[in-house]
Amino acid sequence: MINIWIDTDPGIDDALALAMAAASKEQIHVIGISSCGGNSSLETVTENALRLSSYLGMEDAVVVRGAAVPLVRKKRDAEAVHGANGLGNVEIPATEKKAIEESPFLAIRNKIMEVEGKITFVTLAPLTNVATLLRAFPELKDKIEKIVMMGGSAGPGNDTPYAEFNIWGDPEAAHIVYNSGLPIVMCGLDVTTICGMTREAVAELVASDDELLNIYGRMMDFEFNQPYYINEPLLGIHDATTILYLRFPELFGGVQSTVKVDCSERETVGQTVCTEDPNGNVFLLNQVDQPKLMATVIEMLKELSASLK
Ligand code: RIB
Ligand code: CA
């Protein structure tokens, strides 16, 4: 069993990552979920994390309300891609579940320290929470086996020509995390843009009379029809690749690297400069079996839905 903590800003692909985790109960135990301002405001992404964790049957996963804004720079969002409610304006059933708001970082630290053995930290948002935790509680480094991060790119960015959104969202936090000395599996755009859902696959989900499949289909259909994706053949399932890597590492390939984050005031701010390095602390994913991965995503959504009935 892999014990994980998920840091997230739901977010349509974050929602898919949470579904993949919920569909992996035999292999992955989600200790907790922390929200981070990113795709949308902290209030919105926290409410989404609460509703999704309840809807997906992750009742025992505590939800902690994290940072609203980056360490240094102005907050930016991605509502142009994820919609005003962060989930393609698709309604997830409301929940009574409440987030921990009192001393959130101490709460996360204590939850992780309570776990027997080490955990894997899965990051799906700007790295503000992770950087804060590592700085405030250095003892956590002995409890974290590795960080599996959706973020960065050895090539072009997506929010600027140079920077991927999660890094661009808080470059200083990313600098702290990449230089923490912890092993990192980087699920950056190099792999997330070559795996994803086809329009046919999304249309099938939208047409499904299964509630969960239909909800996920409508979220993805919304994103597929935003200006960023309207002419794209594949819808990036960015965040979900982190969980899918944990489940099926054999579907992926990568290269050991060292990564430097551009924290300048130049137009390249947020760029991850990646150098192949056998002694680097970052395993940068850049290969994936896309057809197998997409079929697996759909299968896992179907199994999850059946298990929740
Ligand atoms: O670049 C993709 C990342 O930015 C994903 O985490 C997505 O949810 C957005 O936050
Ligand atoms: Ca995200």
Image: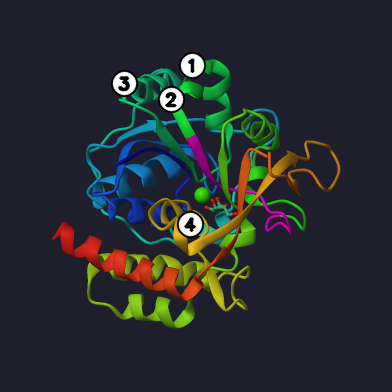
Which label belongs to residue 296? Answer: none
Residue on which disc 4 sits: 241
- Residue located beneath label 2 in the image: 143
Residue 256 in percent (x, y) is at: 65, 47
Using the rendered view, name the quadrant where residue 155 is placed: bottom right
Specify which label sits upstream in the sequence, 3 or 4. Answer: 3
Quadrant in the picture for the C terminus:
bottom left
Give the camera-side residue of 173 and 181. 181
Q: Name the residue under label 3.
A: 114
Label 4 to label 2: alpha-carbon separation: 23 Å
Which range of residues does the magenta coloring cover? 146-159
Q: How far apart are marks 2 and 1 (CA)?
A: 7 Å
Residue at the spot of label 1? 139
For marks 3 and 1, give the CA distance.
13 Å
Is 154 a magenta residue?
yes
Q: Is residue 127 left or right of residue 246?
A: right
Q: Would residue 275 appear left or right of 215 to someone viewing this image?
A: right
From this viewpoint, which residue is outermost toward the front?
Answer: 278
Q: Distance between the residues labelled 2 and 3?
A: 10 Å
Residue type, numbered disc 4:
Thr
Name above or below for residue 212 compared with residue 206. Answer: above
Label 1: which secondary element: helix
The spot of residue 194 in percent (x, y) is 58, 69
Q: Do the residues labelled 2 and 1 touch (CB within 8 Å)?
A: yes
Q: Distance between the residues labelled 4 and 1?
A: 28 Å
Identify the residue at image location x=29%, y=51%.
22
